[in-house]
Image (cartoon, helix red, strand yellow):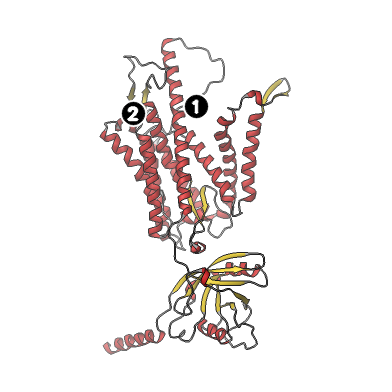
Amino acid sequence: MMWTWIIIFFAYFVTILELGNALPKEFGVLVAESSSEKENFCMVYFKGLSVVPEEKSKAEFHILKDDTEVDWCYDHPESESRGKIVLLYKSNCTIADQARNIQDQGGKGVVFISPNQRVDQFQMNDTDAEDINITVSIISEKSAERLKKMGSTVTVLLFAPYIVNFDFSLLAIWVIAMITVIAGSYWSGIIRFEIYCKEMSSLRESETEPPKRATGKANTEGSVINVSPYYVGFFVMCMGAMLMLLYFFFDYLVYLIIAVFVLASILSVHSCLEPLVLKIPGRFCRFFDLKCGNTSYKIDLRQVSLIAFSMAISICWVVIRKQKYAWILQDILGVAFCINMLKSIRLPSLKICTVLLVLLFFYDIFFVFITPFLTMKGQSIMEEVATGGKSEEMLPMVLRVDYFGFDPLAVCFRQYSLLGFGDILVPGLLISYCHGYDLITNKKLYFPVTIVAYGVGLLVTFVGLFLMSAAQPALLYLVPSTLLPPTIIGWCRHELSTLWTGFKVIRPEVTQCPDVQVTADNPQYEAADEPPIL
């Protein structure tokens, strides 16, 4: 029995020696030019054969010969391959045999087409490739189809530049996210404070005067939205269910999401620009009356123009959404959408903010890190839905910036950077609450602290993206970075109680809200014994 195992081990060892060492593969860039087009493609080449220059200026152009219909397992003396780079499929023999035959006919290189982007099926060891001194590279089938469409005469060069790790698109994403969060949360805090002032004025009038009969349409908007932890939990469950539906039925539901995004964008652009448009003096705008039966409506051309503009910019995105430059318009609409959501959704307490952030913290981790172990293909459900998988459509609920920088290898790794709206809105709701708290209590502390914490957390997210070379659940970093600072500061300043529960009665400073007077019987502000809206 022992001798049997020794023989098996010896045979295995000899087999490894006979196979030799597999040649390593590296990423490179294939530059293709025709009479009318120029484009860069990602390639993988075998290192250790012909030297691939690191600089584009040191590489030479060669004519690309399409031999996808030719079987290069055999010699083709009649082939006009001398001085050219040959494009072909892998055949029944080894790729070393095919490359050797092309080399014998004077070819300068071989570009194999990889169906389904399966580079692992192309293997070559140093024993088989001892006499091969031309470049052997691999491109995707999609790239090959694009090459064929460039024309009958295409010249290509191959080079392998160093990888530049800095991605300017991430910097742009960071700037856009910071501007959106600051603008949305600042506006939200202002609205919360103004409504509180009106509520306190109404409260004081109701205490000193008899109730008056309503004479018009009352503004029923409150300073906060009445939600409970149970409602927040149900909302997160619905988010998970919707994500699963998108994963299984993406090709159908994506159009529903696009339609919802367009409608929301129209409302958001109108809501964000309306205060600016209404500052235009009325004497510069025409008003006209629209009669419907016995009722007459006064039409403001400022509003009509704004509605038309909001609809036009949203519909324009739908038309051009598959173009390379469509991300610019998508980000403009996305910023308007996030700002409108932040100023409209005003959470009542740190308790509700904490419940929402913690639930979405685990939600993000589960759908990014855990689901690859549960799916048949080992895919992250969150990443698959966000990028659209194999579909030509993508969900518009993301900020997207196409890669721009100095790294030619970006065609292999980074086509664009994404940041989901949730990574802006979820921390932004907490930051909005902190700004409202600062205004109502006449402090200038929690809002700037959480803004800085959000910016740092987003930078840490990008660092994790580089270190792990994989998609990251941004809330894994953003939730602790934004939630811990105000909690710790509130605890140290003995203000955590009012932060946590919100307020039952708020008496803003006279200097901040002159319509509300502070008396000895009415304290400046008072923490709620219980969350006022639970």
Precedes in sequence: disc 2 or disc 1: 1
Location of residue 515 by image quarter = top left
Q: Quadrant of residue 446?
A: top left
Q: Which mark is residue 221?
A: 1
- Residue 33 image offset from top left, x and y in percent: 62, 68
Identify the element where label 2 is drawn. loop
Going by the picture, which residue comes out furthest to the front?
Answer: 57
Q: Give the residue number, with chain letter if any, for mark 2.
A: 530
Q: Is residue 421 above or below residue 7?
A: above
**Mark in the foreground, 2 or 1:** 1
Look at the numbered discs 2 and 1 and tell me whether their residues touch, using CB distance below 8 Å.
no
On the image, the x and y values in percent for residue 393 come to 58, 54
Report the residue at 59% width, 68% height from top. Answer: 32
Decide which of 508, 183 is in the foreground and name it: 183
Q: Residue at x 72, y 19 (%)?
A: 294
Is 521 situated above or below 98?
A: above
Q: Residue at x 50, y 24 (%)?
A: 220
Would residue 352 appear left or right of 176 to someone viewing this image? Answer: left
**Viewer-closest of 373 and 37:** 37
* Residue 171 to residue 289: above or below: below
Residue 432 - label: none
Please name the amino acid that badge 1 sits on: Glu
